[in-house]
Image: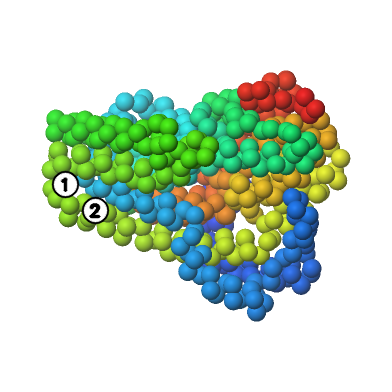
Amino acid sequence: MRRAGTRLPGGLLGWVERAGNRLPDPATIFVGLGVLTLLASTLAARAGLSVAHPATGTPVVAVDLLSRDGLRMVLTGVVTNFTTFAPLGTVLIVMLGIGIAERTGFLAAALAASVRGVPPRLVTPAVVLAGLNSHVAADAGYVVLTPLAAAVFAALGRHPLAGVAAVFAGVAGGFSANLALSALDPMLAGLTQEAARLVDPTYTVAVTANYWFLAASVPLLTVVAWLVSDLVVEPRLGPWRPAPDVEPPALRPLGALERRGLRAAGLALLAVVAIVLVLVVPAGAPLRDPETGGPKPFFDALVPLLALAFAAMGAAYGVVVGTLRSDRDAARMMAEAMAAMGAYVVLACFAGQFVAWFRQSELGLIVAVAGAGALRAAGLAGAPLMVAVVLLVMLIDLVMASASAKWAALAPVLVPMLMTLGWSPEVTQALYRVGDSVTNTVTPLNPYFPVVIVAVRRWAPEVGLGTLLAAMAPYAVAFALAWTAMLVAWVLAGVPVGPGAPLHWPA
């Protein structure tokens, strides 16, 4: 049942909320961050800031983005910085399918049917669990689950931000935890293996290197997020009073026609799944790697496949219930969905510039390598060393969001360093994956932060950046404490972090 709760303006979270809500519009914040990046790049370049690349040994020098060459790169790259901004294509492609699914009435009917099937007190852990296991669909969890969680909570009369916070904690804060392997596993394993071969040229790191630990993390993080949601976040938000122009989704009983529509949508989903299986399962199938036979092309194609699934379900439902009568209706629904994303497109334009400039300045890589060097000089061992590695990655995650880019910079330093101290590359990778995940909910460099803000503001337009950060900070702290403690205890107890993965080197 929903807790009434009262907003608590005091304390650290109250200060974060008040300070954050006094900030300008998020688009303006990204403009400011971009300007600060330009200035910082100039100061760093003039100070001669540089590090040796951990993999190649070549110097990485801070790039002055306000120099003649730097300004040329900045000004000529504005369009491509926007069009190549990672979440932009993902969000817009998926929204084409969701636009049909929503405007035919399919999503509302599906939400009503699903919410009625879950006991009210279990809605929160169900949302968190869905977020944690969404990583098999790459980053699509941000785009699909965030607005759905907001709608579910709004339909129950609960604060939509509580639903968004719970699912965002699962998708972002538990980024590496999953019951199934995702596209990130082979990517990180490959980087770990190359770093390990700097010490042992024959070392091999399996894709399943951390599977046991990450799968076991799912129930832990589900319970932790459930407790944080029910005891901290939702009581603090207080009762939700929708604005006069905001109409919460109705949870009325479904009629016979709507139930037939849902059955038709289910058949359409089965048809899409059958098509995907044909494209993936047979040897030589289009969505299997022609060289390795692996499923990488399938993971790369998940975004359009998800859009197709939503469009097929929405169209099947709409045809049955009469809300979709022609192709013109479908085109109109997709156009309306794109129009509703106008605020996100503006955010993405400025966020794309900031992210690109920060990457081009090399400041993120310099901070990462310098931090790893400081850790090496600290001379820690055992549990304190493991905790220090997680903390280091957490701090770097605040200035360098990409999991693969960050590990490409850190692995050649951390993996050999911990190998010489007796820890296996698999353990080092597990430490990295915890630190890389827990601060994703509070870093401004998370490229999907604008998606979350847009999802909340549909149902609660008054929610500001400070309110969102104050809601997510408890998850970041709780995940960091619980997940790090679990990993340290796991390793010290001698339990392998993955199938056949050693804890120590040499094994």
User: In the rendering, at what x and y percent does residue 368 appear?
Assistant: 72, 52
- Which mark sits nearer the N-terminus, 1 or 2? 1
Left or right: residue 452 compared with residue 309? right
Q: Is residue 165 visible?
A: no
Amino acid, disc 1? Leu
Quadrant of the frame with the N terminus: top left
The one nearer the camera, 292 or 142, is 292
User: In the rendering, at what x and y percent does residue 361 appear?
Assistant: 66, 65
Quadrant of the frame with the C terminus: top right
User: In the rendering, at what x and y percent does residue 74 appear?
Assistant: 57, 72
The one nearer the camera, 338 or 129, is 338
Look at the image and name its color scheme: rainbow
The one nearer the camera, 332 or 289, is 289
Q: Is residue 421 above or below residue 359?
A: above
Mark carried by residue 333 = 2
Residue at 17% from the left image edge and 55% from the top image edge: 328
Tally of marks:
2
Left or right: residue 97 compared with residue 172? left
Q: Quadrant of residue 31?
A: bottom right
Q: Spot the residue most to the bottom.
A: 68
Residue at 67% from the left image edge and 57% from the top image edge: 364
- How crowded is the residue under tag 2: few (<14 C-alpha within 10 Å), some, or many (20+)? many
User: In the rendering, at what x and y percent does residue 433 appear?
Assistant: 63, 38
Real-space Cα distance between discs 1 and 2? Answer: 9 Å
Amino acid, disc 2? Met
Residue at 76% from the left image edge and 45% from the top image edge: 413
Q: Are marks 1 and 2 in contact (CB under 8 Å)?
A: yes
Task: Name the element at disc 1.
Answer: loop
Mark carried by residue 324 = 1
